[in-house]
Image (spheres, rainbow, N blue to C red):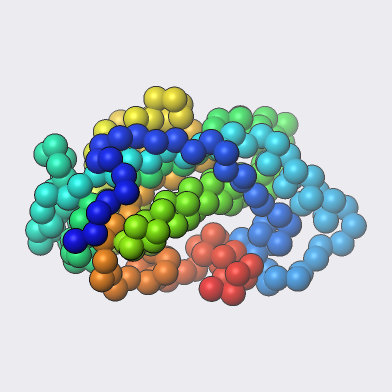
Amino acid sequence: MQKIPWRSGETNFIRSLTATVDVDKLLAMEGGGKGRRPDGRVMELYSDICREAIALAQPAFAWAYHDLVAIEEDRLSLQGGKILTSRFLAAKLAPAQGILVMLATIGPRLEARVKEYQERGDALAAYLLDMAGSALVESVYYSGFQQLELEAAAAGLEATTPFGPGHSYWDNLADQEVIFSLVDTGSLGMMLTDTYLMLPRKSISGISGVGRGFTVAEYHCHYCHLRCTCPLSKARRAVTGK
């Protein structure tokens, strides 16, 4: 068993992440291929939206490592008595020594601007800015995860692709409450509603198994019932070819 490079239960923050989105990403999220370019004023609008989204974003990433006590048929039991429930995760993370619990957000300013556009009747700008916000928070989330993945690799460990509540493989949204209890989210300004919706809306939560000998795909999209057809998945394939 490899030595874990992090202290169990300790919340850490990364605030130096750069959130990025560009015209190619927006076009790919709409279903267009890489290299497609709109003409004239439309291209200018897309470029302006990308610049505005980046200026409004307040990237923040919080994470904590937690030791696993047991992995049973449909649950992950953590040190301290917390339990995450998913038959899928119990199977995929079976070799794990512990999990990384991660939260990312770009703050509330972008969604406030989206609302302003909606109130002014500018539906296209609101739509594009909202879409850019989704791309930005994904950029923050995976940038933070990649740093942790490198730290794990340096210690001779693997970190699985991140998995998140609300997807078809993990439909128990109440586990959001458990995730929020495992990371100190106070300074991120994040909270959960009674229906487990994250606020600010442009936020992502998830976990990654840490250990050795995993057999999981590179992206959690491969396990979703949407089968890589959502806008962000299309954009990833169009931009990265994966």
The image position of residue 226, as x and y in percent, is: 42, 67
Vertical comparison of 229 with 84: above or below? below
Does residue 115 show up?
A: no
- Please name the residue shown 76% across and 69% down the image: 36
- Please name the residue shown 54% across and 32% down the image: 107
Vertical comparison of 145 with 80: above or below? below
- Which image quadrant is residue 239 in? bottom right
- How many numbered tags mark residues here? 0
Residue closest to the eye, 56 or 199: 56
Vertical comparison of 112 with 59: above or below? above
- Please name the residue shown 48% across and 48% down the image: 144
The image position of residue 170, as x and y in percent, is: 27, 56
Give the quadrant of the N terminus.
bottom left
Does residue 68 show up?
A: yes
The image position of residue 128, as x and y in percent, is: 67, 48
- Which image quadrant is residue 95 in? bottom left
Q: Is residue 32 left or right of residue 150?
A: right
- Please name the residue shown 32% across and 70% down the image: 216
The image position of residue 131, as x and y in percent, is: 61, 49
Residue closest to the eye, 107 or 30: 107
Q: Is residue 158 left or right of residue 91?
A: right
Residue closest to the eye, 144 or 207: 144
Residue closest to the eye, 115 or 155: 155
